[in-house]
Image (cartoon, rainbow, N blue to C red):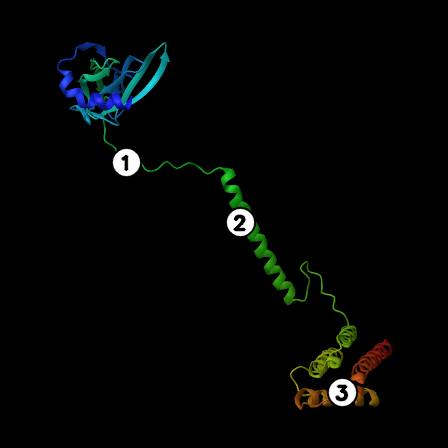
Amino acid sequence: MKKGLLFIAILIISTVASAQVDTTRFSRLSRDSILIGDQVELILDLQMNEGEGFLIAAQSEQLVPGVETINGMTVDTLSVKKGKIDIRAHMTITSFDSGSYVLPPMLALIQNSRGEIDSLLYRGPELYVNTIPIDTATYEIKDIKGQIGYPLTFKEILPWLLLALLLAALVYLIIRLVKARRNNLTLFGKPVQKDPAHIVALRDLEKIRKQKLWQNNKQKQFYTAVTDTLRYYISERFGIVTMERPSGEMLEDLKKQDIEGGTYDKIEKLFGRADLVKFAKYEATAEENEETIPDAVQFVNSTYVSQLEEDGGDE
């Protein structure tokens, strides 16, 4: 087929003048009228025998003034029956000027098995290009309208509404939590139940004992933890300012309280030893370290019991 086409292309000029021309064929349009700018198919139908070659003469981009081609000629094989091949060639055309146009004839060449060439001339159809009618009597030029705005649906608003409610609830909870913390209340307005000072102190001292700090050469951390626990207890039990004060000043205020002499002496000795460990790089003996937690527990228990006796006596 390709060799036949190439052969026809070479010989087309020399043979077309002498070849017999069949002028009884017509090309056709997929529809005979269009609006300005619409597209329409120009169609040629032909039949040939198997083994024959054909060539359709190329068309310029402008078929006639006012009618233009969109793409080149496309050829489709419709059917092959009993040695006969039905072929359809088509191309897309358009026009941007209204009017009536007679399309030009189109030439198709067929080379048979004997090498003879037949020329088929397809007469062109008439194309009608219409424009949109305008009533000039009532026609009025108007400004370009803006984009059409569609109302929001509830389905579109719902996610944003839920997000707003969630943020409002979160802000409310944060405000309520801050106010509750300031007033020493829970989130739901109930007073925060604090453990008694002696319970807190005894619990913390037990935790310090289980950590075994001094046994792991962490004497400074050990005495810091014990004295901080005792400072908190003394502050809660006796109302003495203990934090950020030298041990000597705190002990002077503590001495004024009704504390049994032996108990006070032990706690004074404990704080003195703690200051030496923390600030003078003193290495306490194992015996001193072992008696630190028991002395602290004995101080808390004895002062707590004396408080209970005072409260009972007041009653």
Place residue 244 in its image quadrant: bottom right
Given this view, does label 1 or label 3 mark the residue nearer the observer? 3
Q: Name the residue under label 1.
A: 144
Query: Which residue is the site of mark 3?
Result: 270
**Relative horizontal placement of residue 73, taking residue 204 as reference (left or right):** left
Which quadrant of the figure contains the C terminus? bottom right
Disc 3 residue type? Leu
x and y percentages locating residue 208 in the rendered image:
75, 76
Depth check, front residue: 196 or 70: 70
Of helix, strand and loop, which one carries label 1? loop
Asked whether residue 136 is in view, the answer is: no
Q: Is 88 left or right of 225, judged from the image as shown?
A: left
Nearer mark to the viewer, of 2 and 3:
3
Q: Do the residues labelled 2 and 1 touch (CB within 8 Å)?
A: no
Mark 2 or mark 1, earlier in chain:
1
**Which residue is the site of mark 2?**
164
